Image: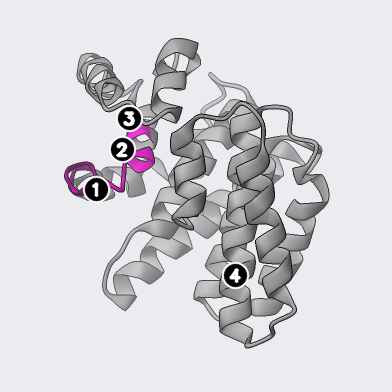
Amino acid sequence: MTKSMHDEPTLSDRIWAGDETAVEEARTRYQADPEGQFIPWVSTLYSYRGRLGYTAELLLLKEEILAWSEPERLYNHSISRYQAADRADVLSTVLEWMPGAPHIRDRYLDAASALISAALRWLKYDAAGNHTLLLLILTHASIHMRRGDTLAAQDCLLRAAIDAGSIATPNQRARVYRKLGALYLRLAQMTGRVRWMPISVIYLVRALCVWSIPWDVRRKTLMFWR
């Protein structure tokens, strides 16, 4: 199995910090091994989606992303179920985010939902405190909201909130808090129920207060990134 470029702490830390030179290094790794580094490359572009050029590159990969989103292709038993679930988190997150006409968006959301369901089976819901499990659940919450099912979304948010504080990695804990805050805010806007607003604020503040995270992670919280 090809080692992911994101397993190298130096490159990973630079991506978390928003260092654009890391993108070009990641691009070089991807061009040298397009099959083995495709998902890390997609993850890198998604991390920099606030820059229009990288967003355009990511959108050009939409058909390849859909092809990779077949659960049977993603988890081919040359990797562990946890690694497969991590890949599913990347692809489902990107698919949920992708823009398009309604019928195209439905295609993306269907693919993301199927991938999340498969990944949750692989993990068997036994990874309490595992950021991958919680991020999968939060992406599912966002998909439910896009489809107008606020009750299912609330259930997902509660399940993620229970274990969010137990995530060991500061960057990932801040990311989960940020997503919880942003999604509770969207839930308040969708339902008109102001009771969700204080919960949103609490999680956004918690995301900002996580110790030892780079500025770019805090910036994404301040910009209400999911």
Sooner in the amino-acid sequence: mark 4 or mark 3: 3
* Residue placed under numbered mark 1 in the picture: 55
Sooner in the amino-acid sequence: mark 2 or mark 1: 2
What amino acid is found at the position of numbered circle 4 in the picture?
A: Leu
Indicate the secondary structure of the residue bearing disc 1: helix
* Label 3 Cα crowd, 10 Å radius (few <14 / some 14-19 / many 20+): many
* Residue placed under numbered mark 3 in the picture: 41
User: From the viewer's perspective, is residue 106 above or below residue 76?
Assistant: below
Alpha-carbon distance for marks 4 and 3?
A: 30 Å
What amino acid is found at the position of numbered circle 1 in the picture?
A: Thr
User: From the viewer's perspective, is residue 91 above or below residue 110?
Assistant: above
Q: Is residue 65 magenta?
A: no
Alpha-carbon distance for marks 4 and 2?
A: 26 Å
Checking the image for residue 45, the label placed there is: 2
Majority secondary structure in the magenta region: helix
Give the left or right position of residue 27, taking residue 156 as reference: left
Instruction: Provide residue 2's location: percent of width, then percent of height.
Output: 42, 13
Alpha-carbon distance for marks 3 and 1?
A: 12 Å
* Residue placed under numbered mark 4 in the picture: 185
Sooner in the amino-acid sequence: mark 3 or mark 1: 3
